[in-house]
Image (cartoon, rainbow, N blue to C red):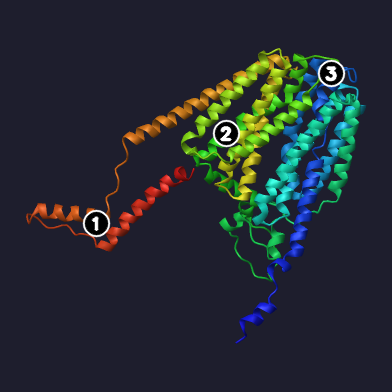
Amino acid sequence: MVPSGQVAEKQEPPELGRHPELKSWRCLVFYLCFYGFMAQMRPGESFITPYLLGTDKNFTQEQVTNEITPVLSYSYLAVLVPVFLLTDYLRYKPVLVLQGLSYISVWLLLLLGDSVLHMQFMELFYSLTMAARIAYSSYVFSLVCPARYQRMAGYSRTAVLLGVFASSVLGQLLVTVGRVPFSTVNYISLGFLTFSLVLALFLKRPKRSLFFNRAAPARHGASPSELDRMNPAPSQPADAKPGPAPLGAWRDWTLVRMLRELGDHLRLPQLRLWSLWWVFNSAAYYLIVYYVHILWNVVHPTTDASSVYNGGADAASTLLGAITSFSAGFVKIRWALWAKLVIAGVTAVQAALVFLMYSTSSIWLCYVAFVLFRGAYQFLVPIATFQIASSLSKELCALVFGVNTFFATILKTIVILIVADKRCLGLPVRSQFLVYFVYFLVLFIVYLSAAMLVILRHLREGRHPPPALPPPQEEKAEQVLSLQDRGLSGPKPEVPPPALEDSVWTAGLASREQNQQPEAKA
């Protein structure tokens, strides 16, 4: 027997053994967060609309509203699914490089272009950058172990928000304090974007991804994904050679298996509710974000660049959105009962703020209304994310968010085609905001009606609770008394053994608790 002291001397302390791994983890976190911060440094982004409408480009308001801006939604719908699939197939890094090149193309066209067609191509490249944003978050999770997902999500999200905030503040300081022309601010943005592209070139390319590159880690001993645990594939001999795929092999494709799993989960009411909220409310949210800068120029038309505070409004809305997103994590209510009422209340606030932006002639009220509008939306985003993700695996969660975003983009594109495109109604921006107000008002009425139905059903069930199942001992006593009351007038029925009777009662109670379990968890 070896003394315990010798064993302690031979064992390496876990802190020393893990020191190189910890150092590598810290370097990776720092580089990813620094890249995420620098990729958001676009100080000229808040001033693109006044730059296009100003003396630098001399586009008319109708051209920007009805010809240039709608192209963003059309092209985003066209590139969303291909970029989503390429992101996973190419393992993230090439798409991040593509995003950097697209950003540089956007600002080159913005600086050198002089026609409506050039600006429409600019919107096309900008839609590529929007579709590629999923690559950064997915890339972050592919490089770390599952135990560090939550910490890495917090670090990367903080870096992105700080980048957006610093970019907006810097742009506002350059325009207001430094009195730097819009064109110069755009050249500064181009310099930042070039530097972020260089950073993207040095990113480490992961060896695995969620959908297309899942077999490699299994061969090297990595743990299988959650979907693999739910649907284990049949084992094959080590010397088996790959042969032709059977006729029904398409049923085992990852995407098909995930769609089947998703169909089973659609029966969950909270998943349906928050997915519908994601589709309808996020579509309206981005309609406001797309056109609010044009509305600001209508409310406060000016040739003095130093009096334009778009960057300050974007910075304040980003900061308030971060605060409301953080505070949403501390809201502890019974979401199965109150979710629709909370959504209705937030939607009513958004409708009132959109109407204020439509009706006011004060640019400061318009700024404040937009800041509050964006904060209200960001308050519900983490709640919706948790409610959707809590009942799904990581792969299914990614698929659900992708599908929700796709349907929201379809809805947003339809609204823009009807309301904003010059080939249809081609409404001016103020009239568009009136349409968006009616849209939010209809959503509020629908959510409020659904919330009232849920509350009334809950109150009715509270007044008339379902009869409780009797304990097994009382049930046995009642059966014995009923047999004694019958006397000897006829043959006695056969009483099941006590063990069998207890098992039947337990199974009934378990079934009842299982039916109530999703609502209790939510």
Give the side of residue 338 with respect to residue 219, left or right.
left
Q: Amino acid at mark 2?
A: Leu
**Height in image: 217 above or below 514?**
below
Which secondary structure lies at badge 2?
helix
**Residue at 72%, 42% in the rendered image:** 158
Occupied quadrant, residue 128: top right
**Height in image: 383 above or below 229?**
above
**Height in image: 422 above or below 468?**
above
User: Badge 2, how many Cα within 10 Å: few under 14, some, many 20+?
Assistant: some
- Residue behind mark 3: 53
Q: Which one is in front, 244 or 504?
A: 504
N-terminal label among 3 and 2: 3
- Residue behind mark 1: 473
Occupied quadrant, residue 2: bottom right
**Residue at 58%, 32% in the rendered image:** 277
N-terminal label among 3 and 1: 3
- Residue behind mark 2: 276
